[in-house]
Amino acid sequence: MTSFETVLPKLARVDEDAPVKGRTIERVRPAGKNLIIEFSGDLHLHTHMKMNGSWHIYRPGERWQRPRRDMRIVISTVDYVAVAFTVPVAEFHSSSSLARSDDLRRMGPDLLGKTFDRDEALRRIRARPGEEIANVLLNQRVLAGIGNIWKSETLFCAGVDPFTGVADLGDTKLERIVDCACKLLRHSVESRSTFAVYSRGGDPCRRCGTPIRYRKQGDDARGTYWCPKCQT
Ligand SMILES: [Zn+2]
């Protein structure tokens, strides 16, 4: 690393004590919507994107796609510049404090992880019989990796009404939901996708032509898109 810059006081203090600049980036790994960057010398940077945070990768000198005031962290190497914009969670850890971190420990099986524990994911979904399936899919402690887009897309793929309670879904349906999520997420990492329902409110369903519906759902009023005919 050729430089490390941050506007976050907590990170800046660690950087003053044990400079980040000059270390080697050994590994970058996602865990759901968490990102962990491992530096040489047992230093780990954990960030969580929540709704609005994002990491961008640029070439040195390239124009940023978000304003400078949104910048929280800049990591530079000779060839690349990684910028974290409005990340709400950013913490340095050692290996041992990272292993104790609540956010990460309590997280559900990671759909994009090297190994995905399907049975554990199904067990965690079934443990919430009174909740609507779309809300459960967004809960990172149940299943890590599904954001609002893939919530709608997964349920269209599985042919399940997003407002169905978990208790009303049989084993086959739940397995189908998890398998759809797995397939769609892995596919989305490899290619730019066109959506079946997400952001298509009022447009005809690609399968049956019925207008796609849109409604806010759950305590956070997250937008949900679905086909009332294909997802019953
Ligand atoms: Zn349809």
Image (cartoon, helix red, strand yellow):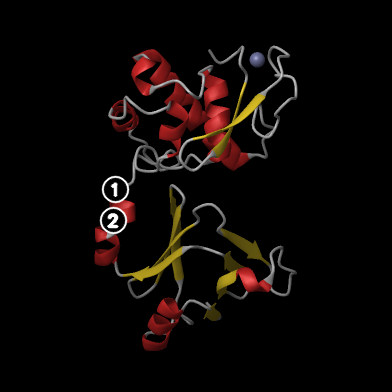
Q: Is residue 33 left or right of residue 41?
A: right
Residue at x-position 30% and y-position 69%: 94
Observer able to see residue 80:
no
Q: Residues within 10 Å of mark 2 (few under 14, many from 20)?
A: few
Q: Nearer the viewer, residue 81 or 158?
A: 158
Question: Where on the picture, by quarter, is residue 169?
Answer: top left
Q: Label 2: which residue?
A: 102
- Say if 143 sits above or below 210 in the image: below
Secondary structure beneath disc 2?
A: helix
Q: Is residue 181 above or below residue 12?
A: above
Identify the secondary structure beneath mark 1. Answer: loop
What x and y, as percent, mark residue 193?
Answer: 67, 35
- Amino acid marked by disc 1: Arg
Residue type, label 2: Asp
The x, y position of residue 59, in whole percent, is 69, 68
User: Could you tell whether 133 is left or right of 101 in the image?
Assistant: right
